[in-house]
Image (cartoon, helix red, strand yellow):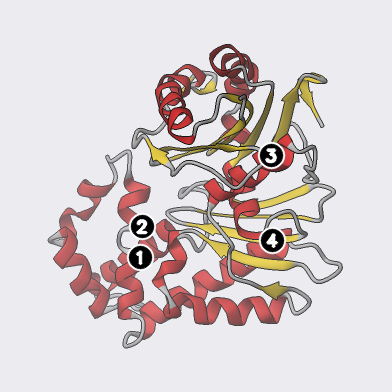
C-alpha cells in the first residue's frame, strides 16, 4: 500500500532538523539533526550542500516512518529572504529527482517560526536567539522588522544584550559613568583581563554567538544590579518596537515569543510584557504552540491537503508545484 508522506526541514545556524510524516494522519518521525550548517556561496545558500546532508537523512526517516513516497516538502531556511536565489532555482528539481517530490514550499526561517508559534492566524511573532526578528501577517501579506544581524540591528537579541553588558563592564573597568562592577566581575571571570577582550572578540567569525553567551549573565545580575536591569529594559523596548512594526492593526491579533532568548525568564519577560501591553493594547499575548520545525510540519500538511491559507510571495514563502512550476501562489 502506498502511504503518501511529507518532508519538513528547518535549516539554521546549528544545522538541519528534518521530519518525515504521513500526510493524512498524525504519524511523523522524530526529528533528525545534522549539526552542520548549510554553506553559503557566491549565489547564496548552497543547494548542493543542503542536498548532500538531506538525502541520507530523509531516506533513513522515511523507512522508520513507513512512508513510501514524499510528495510534499517544506524547506524553512535561515537567510532565504536575502540569500535564497540558488535554493529557489535548484532545490525543487533536486527534490523531485531524489524523492519524487511534486510540491515544494520554500519558507524563510521566520515564517516557519511564526507558523510553529501561532499557526495560520493573524498576529505577530518575535523570534529571539543570538539575533532577533519580528514577523507578522494579516493573512494577506507578510511584514518583517529587524533581523539585520548583530552589526546593523537584531536590537534586543542575545548579541545585543551581551554587547551592552560587556560595554557596561568596560565602563566600570575604565571608571566611566554607566559602568557595572557586577558585570565587570562576570566578564573577567569569563574572558579574563578586560584589556585582552578586543583581541579575543574582533577576529572571530562567531563573535555574535560569543556576545550572546554573555546575555544570560546580564540576566543573572539584573535583580541586584540597576545597570544590568536597565539593559534588559532597553532590550524589551527594542523588541516591543519590532513587534509593533509588524502586528496587524485590526482585530485581536495574537502575539507570541519563540526562541532561546526568552529562556532568560523574568528579568527580560517582565519588562517585555509590560511594553507589549502598553504599545499593543488590542493584541493578545499567547504562549507559542510549537517551534519552527513544528511550523514546517504544519505548512506541509496544509499544503498537501490543499488548505494552505498563508500569503505567498517571492521572498518569505513561495510554492512550486505541478500547476505552478516557476513558483507562484
Give residue 215's mark: 1
Q: Are marks 3 and 4 in contact (CB under 8 Å)?
A: no
User: Which residue lies at the image location 42% right of the left edge and 54% below the top edge?
Assistant: 130
Tell me how far mark 1 sits from mark 3, CA to CA. 29 Å
Residue that mark 4 sits on: 124
Decide if residue 124 is in sight here.
yes
Q: Is residue 103 left or right of residue 46?
A: right
Give the quadrant of the C terminus. Answer: top right
Q: Earlier in the sequence, mark 3 or mark 4?
A: 4
Tell me how far mark 3 sits from mark 2, CA to CA. 26 Å
Q: Position of residue 156 (x, y in %)?
A: 50, 63
In this rendering, the answer to whether 225 lies above or below 76 is below
- Of 94 and 285, nearer the camera is 94
Give residue 316's mark: 3
Q: Earlier in the sequence, mark 4 or mark 1?
A: 4
Q: Are marks 2 and 1 in contact (CB under 8 Å)?
A: yes
Q: Are there few (<14), some (14-19), or many (20+) residues within 10 Å of tag 3?
A: many
User: Which residue lies at the image location 50% right of the left edge and 76% below the top edge?
Assistant: 269
Amino acid at each position: 500500500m502506498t502511504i503518501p508522506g511529507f518532508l519538513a526541514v528547518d535549516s539554521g545556524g546549528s544545522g538541519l532538523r528534518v521530519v518525515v510524516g504521513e500526510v493524512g494522519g498524525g504519524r511523523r518521525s522524530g526529528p533528525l539533526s545534522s549539526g552542520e550548517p548549510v554553506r553559503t556561496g557566491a549565489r547564496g545558500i548552497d543547494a548542493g550542500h543542503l542536498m548532500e546532508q538531506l538525502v541520507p537523512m530523509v531516506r533513513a526517516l522515511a523507512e522508520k516512518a513507513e512512508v513510501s513516497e514524499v510528495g510534499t516538502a517544506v524547506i524553512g531556511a535561515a537567510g532565504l529572504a536575502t540569500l535564497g536565489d540558488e535554493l529557489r532555482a535548484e532545490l525543487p528539481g533536486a527534490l523531485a529527482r531524489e524523492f519524487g517530490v511534486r510540491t515544494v514550499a520554500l519558507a524563510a526561517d521566520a515564517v516557519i517560526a511564526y507558523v510553529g508559534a501561532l499557526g495560520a492566524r493573524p498576529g505577530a511573532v518575535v523570534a529571539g536567539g543570538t539575533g532577533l526578528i519580528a514577523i507578522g501577517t494579516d493573512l494577506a501579506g507578510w511584514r518583517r522588522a529587524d533581523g539585520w544581524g548583530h552589526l546593523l540591528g537584531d536590537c534586543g537579541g542575545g548579541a545585543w544584550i551581551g554587547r551592552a553588558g560587556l560595554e557596561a563592564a568596560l565602563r566600570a573597568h575604565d571608571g566611566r559613568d554607566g559602568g557595572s562592577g557586577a558585570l565587570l566581575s562576570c566578564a573577567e571571570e569569563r574572558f579574563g583581563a578586560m584589556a585582552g577582550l578586543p583581541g579575543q572578540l574582533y577576529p572571530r567569525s562567531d563573535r555574535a554567538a560569543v556576545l550572546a553567551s554573555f546575555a544570560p549573565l546580564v540576566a543573572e545580575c539584573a535583580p541586584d544590579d540597576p545597570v544590568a536591569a536597565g539593559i534588559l529594559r532597553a532590550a524589551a523596548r527594542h523588541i516591543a518596537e519590532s513587534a509593533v512594526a509588524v502586528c496587524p492593526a485590526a482585530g485581536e491579533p495574537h502575539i507570541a515569543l519563540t526562541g532561546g532568548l526568552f529562556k532568560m525568564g523574568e528579568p527580560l519577560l517582565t519588562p517585555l510584557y509590560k511594553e507589549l501591553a502598553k504599545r499593543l493594547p488590542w493584541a493578545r499575548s499567547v504562549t507559542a504552540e510549537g517551534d519552527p520545525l513544528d511550523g514546517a510540519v504544519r505548512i506541509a500538511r496544509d499544503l498537501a491537503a490543499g488548505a494552505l491559507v498563508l500569503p505567498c510571495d517571492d521572498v518569505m514563502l513561495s510554492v512550486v508545484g505541478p500547476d505552478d512550476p516557476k513558483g507562484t501562489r
